[in-house]
Image (cartoon, rainbow, N blue to C red):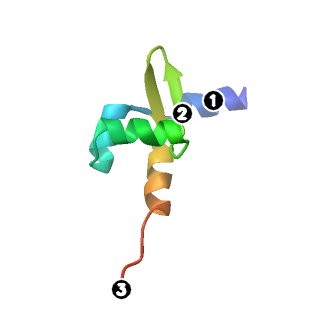
Amino acid sequence: MSQERQLAEVRFLTVAEVASIMRVSKMTVYRMVHAGDLPAIRVGRSFRVPEDAVHKYLHTSYVDTA
């Protein structure tokens, strides 16, 4: 039951929403999903990405510049 509650609290984003947040094209998001860089679930013919996975990806992708 606890796992069901956790899944109910997960907010899923569409590919278009992820692209908007990351300021990239939808095709870039699709490439990231297919490459395994961004986890997603398939709903019918479309993908949904957990919102926390997007934020985690962005936080771990920061590059320190001089």
Measured as percent of width and height from the top left, residue 37 is found at 52, 46
Considering depth in this image, is 4 or 61 the residue closer to the camera?
A: 61
Q: Residue at x 62, y 34 (%)?
A: 6
Q: Residue furthest top?
A: 44
- The number of numbered badges drawn on the structure is 3
Name which of mark 1 and mark 3 comes first in the sequence. 1
66 relative to 38 in the view: left or right: left
Q: Picture quarter containing residue 13?
A: top left
Q: Which residue is mark 3?
A: 66
The quadrant of the rendering that contains the N terminus is: top right
Measured as percent of width and height from the top left, residue 45 is found at 44, 16
Measured as percent of width and height from the top left, residue 52 is found at 49, 46
* Mark-to-mark CA distance, 1 and 3: 44 Å
Q: Residue at x 45, y 26 (%)?
A: 47
Name which of mark 2 and mark 3 comes first in the sequence. 2
6 relative to 22 in the view: left or right: right
- State if disc 2 and disc 1 touch (CB < 8 Å): yes
Three-letter residue code for mark 2: Glu
Q: Which residue is mark 1?
A: 5
Three-letter residue code for mark 3: Ala
Q: Residue at x 54, y 39 (%)?
A: 39
Q: Residue at x 41, y 77 (%)?
A: 64
Please indicate, yes or no, whether residue 11 appears anywhere in the rendered image: no
Three-letter residue code for mark 1: Arg
Q: Secondary structure at mark 1?
A: helix
Q: Which residue is mark 2?
A: 9
